[in-house]
Image (cartoon, coloured by chain):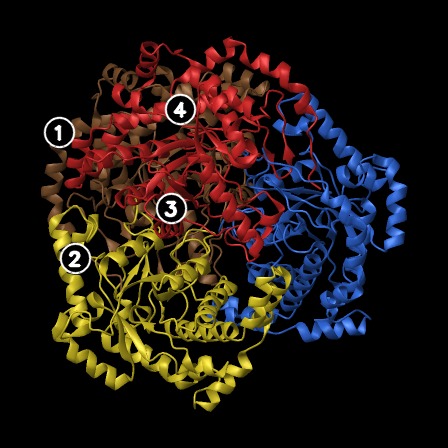
Chain colours: A red, B blue, C yellow, D brown
Amino acid sequence: MRKQTNAFQIELPSWGFANTGTRFGKFLQPAAASTTEEKFSDAGEVHRLTGVCPTIALHVLWDLPEGATGVANIKALAEKFRVRPGSINPNVFQDQLYKYGSVGSPVPVARTAAMAHLLESADLAALHERLAPDQRMLVEYKPFEPAFYHTDIADWGMALLLAKKAGPKAKVLVDTGHHYQGQNIEQIVAWLLGDDMLGGFHFNDRRYADDDLTLGSIDPYQIFRIFHEIFYFAWETGKRADVAYMIDQSHNLKGKIEAMIQTVTTAQELYAKAAIVDHEKLAACQAKCALVDAEVCLKEAFSTDVRPAIREWARSHGLPEDPLDAFRKSGYLERITEVRCKRNAASVSSYA
Amino acid sequence: MRKQTNAFQIELPSWGFANTGTRFGKFLQPAAASTTEEKFSDAGEVHRLTGVCPTIALHVLWDLPEGATGVANIKALAEKFRVRPGSINPNVFQDQLYKYGSVGSPVPVARTAAMAHLLESADLAALHERLAPDQRMLVEYKPFEPAFYHTDIADWGMALLLAKKAGPKAKVLVDTGHHYQGQNIEQIVAWLLGDDMLGGFHFNDRRYADDDLTLGSIDPYQIFRIFHEIFYFAWETGKRADVAYMIDQSHNLKGKIEAMIQTVTTAQELYAKAAIVDHEKLAACQAKCALVDAEVCLKEAFSTDVRPAIREWARSHGLPEDPLDAFRKSGYLERITEVRCKRNAASVSSYA
Amino acid sequence: MRKQTNAFQIELPSWGFANTGTRFGKFLQPAAASTTEEKFSDAGEVHRLTGVCPTIALHVLWDLPEGATGVANIKALAEKFRVRPGSINPNVFQDQLYKYGSVGSPVPVARTAAMAHLLESADLAALHERLAPDQRMLVEYKPFEPAFYHTDIADWGMALLLAKKAGPKAKVLVDTGHHYQGQNIEQIVAWLLGDDMLGGFHFNDRRYADDDLTLGSIDPYQIFRIFHEIFYFAWETGKRADVAYMIDQSHNLKGKIEAMIQTVTTAQELYAKAAIVDHEKLAACQAKCALVDAEVCLKEAFSTDVRPAIREWARSHGLPEDPLDAFRKSGYLERITEVRCKRNAASVSSYA
Amino acid sequence: MRKQTNAFQIELPSWGFANTGTRFGKFLQPAAASTTEEKFSDAGEVHRLTGVCPTIALHVLWDLPEGATGVANIKALAEKFRVRPGSINPNVFQDQLYKYGSVGSPVPVARTAAMAHLLESADLAALHERLAPDQRMLVEYKPFEPAFYHTDIADWGMALLLAKKAGPKAKVLVDTGHHYQGQNIEQIVAWLLGDDMLGGFHFNDRRYADDDLTLGSIDPYQIFRIFHEIFYFAWETGKRADVAYMIDQSHNLKGKIEAMIQTVTTAQELYAKAAIVDHEKLAACQAKCALVDAEVCLKEAFSTDVRPAIREWARSHGLPEDPLDAFRKSGYLERITEVRCKRNAASVSSYA
């Protein structure tokens, strides 16, 4: 488990530290980040306490509004706050131009703008060549977004066909909140792994829609089974699944940094539980259709309290054993609240 | 059918004429209403063309921000634009105070504020006494709102218990978009009718969540079956179901007034189809478990093209036969666009 | 519309005429077919009255239990009852051997048996060569079957990958009842058409699960939209979609033959409505994002009462105008009831 | 936790030991029980090993086909196998008469028969008076059963209205598999507790439909939250929730007795985890809207490995620490397999 705990890293979303909202408005937090520097600062704090979040996902529109000229600034922030930029997320949904869609819009100028923005996003990431050898393009899918008739890429099948058309660097991105009710996400993960098309995850949890709630707050066993498929694939094939783990949550009610720490901790625990499944035993049970034993084997790992081992791992890496407690004692929240609160109070908007 | 078409009226939502949006922002329309006067004007236009929308639902926070002092203004607008104020909708979800709920919030000051606002809303409606004899209180339910862990009143059972606790003037409000996937809304309507607890509808359609799409744009047959239950109840019991029909839609992509006219027209058609179901025949089929014939009986009505009859009804009432076409020829949209467009362009907001 | 009505044909399922049931037992019908001859006879009766069901789908296990030696018998029945055998359905789910799956079972002997049965099914169809040039293999998917942990081919994406692996004659079969709640079936149909991978349909309707209810009894507008995608594809590309329409229903409560006639009639109506959509107009609306007009265009066709035109078509083909009425007057049901009722009464089984 | 583990008991279903099936047939197990004596024997074995299953739920039709005259036999079996009869389940769904419903059927003779059977079921339980003071009537609900248009009692709201109409001894029965996707079962449980209308549970798990899979095999955290609501209610109100815990599972693929032992063990673990939630701390977190801490509080209990404590409890009660292992070593399965296997092999039935 220690080896796997060492290997586990998960990317933080810059937008998870900002005030975001529902269609009826935003519930504002006095400590929310509103500049790219503040987002780097908050992400750096989470990484400092957990040790497993070395990168931050950026949204071009929100974090790099000035385009390529902002790259130097990003580099400086990365150095200052000790978190590197990770995935680059284009935004082709917020501008008024994208009212009827982006690359699939019937409006030619919207399609052109979307393509230009996507290429610029690739540039921002690659700087010198678009999609460098070590880069990948991730195609995400989503069955619905409230208030719209449909989404263009509704499920993993559609994302897969598009990614295959796009070329060998394109893979599918699985957002755990982007599925139909009852859909077996771990089965989809297994198919994508088998087809060498799983690129990464956007982690969160949900009760019904794309709720972006804390990972594992609703159904932790499902996340465990997803991690299990990845470990099992590696065990079965001898190949390492090259999968990017990212958080895609943006909390309205929980403190943003606290929620992020809680998420990282939960991900670590569920990953560690999945790491201790006895694959030989499980495979033997499956081969002889011993269902009860196969389930006992999975549950044995899930029931194990891995928290002592993770605390020990943290200690040995000079990290706080209880990152949430350490954060609260650090005074960071109080400091940023004082700095940011006035500005945040000003930005209320109304629904109608 | 003519008698029933005469009887059918449906209330327009003031917020349906304003720029509203998704959590990622609003797609702005140059002709969107932003003052209460503009909302009355737009509603008046829809009523002028369709003849069946004499009332407009108001949202206290958005339409009566100044409280009781605004009532005289509302009266003047009603007279000027020939639509009366209808249902009064309190808003206990938008203010920062309601972050953790309203009447069910653990925060005492939020509960107090919510109660005060609800009472004020009743006052606004009644002016002299709270909930006058001819008024009713409608308790709405909703299984989820994206981004939240749960809703306090998740289904019709919870709304029913609350309404019964509240007293005889309280009834349940059925929003057609507030149900679980696969839930049989017409069965719920029948139970509420049988228990004398159905107060009204918020009409819209949806594919998955509370999408607030045009009524009947996804599943028109379901709306037909809902209307049918209401006619059937009246036929079976001899009682008139005292039900308020209201639209709760707010279009992002369709032109707001056009979408409202389309909705009213669709509602009229589906209502007229339900009106011509042969109840005697259907009851006889049901009594002898003649399923095929019972379904043929329903489908016979649904398959009938009622549009000629509705056009005839419109003609005989001095209304345009094709309200959408009449609207386009009226020049109203061009006029309001010119007046409102500059102001609307200014109000963009960002998600993160 | 006449041309398209002429072109429309739909296949009947042999098992739709037999007593079938729920997990709690079968509700028996005295007129249910229990031999292959009776199934051909009933299918022949439906074709005689509707004129659009020239083929009958066979289930190898139930209709050809003796294998290849039964082919001569099938040919004789086809001649006698004037319906040809259509699709050949292997059965790898009923035998005790398939307890843990069939071609995906961990049990080697189950996998071998399943493969042998599938090849034999192909032989039965082709007689001399396995999958003749004009034959196709259809891969069906299904998200769940109650009481099982998962299904191997859960969605169209998995079916697509398998079909592509299998070879150029393999296509995807869309059963309208095999989807997640809220899933956009017409969008899947459009993707499969665009990828030249749509092989056919199993038509039925459902409220929640794989209910196998009468096509269009729950959501007729959805079936209309599915047919529309097929017409639209042909109009857009100039290619004919080579799609097999099949019914997969097995009624417990409705009379089996009556339900089949009702289904065929409904399918014809919805197909005819889809045929009269004005594609030029719709495409123009879509190109300029005129959502209201695009919807009006679709609804215009759906609201049209096509029944008179279908009656006229039937008259001109020497078919009864009202097949259900003609069936009832034919005395067929009384005749088969007398012959079959005693045998059917004997076959009750208990759940536990 | 020890006190609560002592208090926890769960009822076994007689039908869970018999061969049951899907609509396509039964997968037979050589050791399945087919007489009432065998069902008592198997239930007795589970109780002997787990110590928490003193009662067995009976299905009148399957276990008491001869009616009241069979009661003496049941008493003898109860004594012999040391498990008492528990809940009495009428069966008004299997007989051909109930094709169109039972107490809600349009067929008078079906309604009469259903009422008579229900009263007889009450008699069987009470012997001398119908519903004795210490008896209760439980009204179960279910949103759908595949292949049917609707169910009469679709949700907890309908069950509640019926139970309230029936009288003070009637309560609602919550089957964890009888809900819409995404429905918040623990919230329903809380409402029923608050209204003093929660009578008991039918425990099982499911992925999509009423799958009757092993409790906690899909979503153990949900079951934990349900137990938590019950403990929390007791803590908040000082009242004991008088709730009957029953298993309603019938396994096709897992060994029936093994699956039952696994279920009981899982229920015990999740109950024990719920028992150690710190209610004072949680209530304090909730009162100040400290969401992260409230969740940590719940997760703290859920993450705790309670298996050592349960093993200790078993030891102290003279029960095997690992009931599944003890069962396998007992030779019971081999003995009953030898006795029952021939009879079980004979009972195959076909779908069509």
Vertical placement of residue A211 versus B178, above or below: above
Q: Residue at left 38%, top 21%?
A: A52
Give the position of the C terminus of chain B as an image quadrant. Answer: top right
Give the position of the N terminus of chain B as an image quadrant. Answer: bottom right
In space, the residues marked 4 and 2 are separated at their CA atoms by 43 Å
Name the kind of residue labelled 1 in the image. Answer: Ser
Q: Residue at left 84%, top 41%?
A: B126
Residue D330: numbered disc: 1
Q: Do labels 4 and 2 share a chain?
A: no
- The chain to which mark 4 is attached is A
On screen, residue B79 versus residue C320, left or right, reads right
Q: Total of numbered circles in the picture? A: 4
* Few, some or many residues within 10 Å of mark 1 (<14, 14–19, 20+): few
Residue D210: numbered disc: 3
Q: Are marks 4 and 1 on the same chain?
A: no
In space, the residues marked 4 and 1 are separated at their CA atoms by 40 Å
Marks 3 & 4, CB-CB < 8 Å contact: no
In space, the residues marked 3 and 4 are separated at their CA atoms by 30 Å
Kindly state the secondary structure of the residue where label 1 is placed.
helix
- The chain to which mark 2 is attached is C
Marks 1 & 3, CB-CB < 8 Å contact: no
**Residue corresponding to mark 4:** A266
| Front disc: 4 or 1 | 4
In space, the residues marked 3 and 2 are separated at their CA atoms by 28 Å
**Residue corresponding to mark 2:** C114
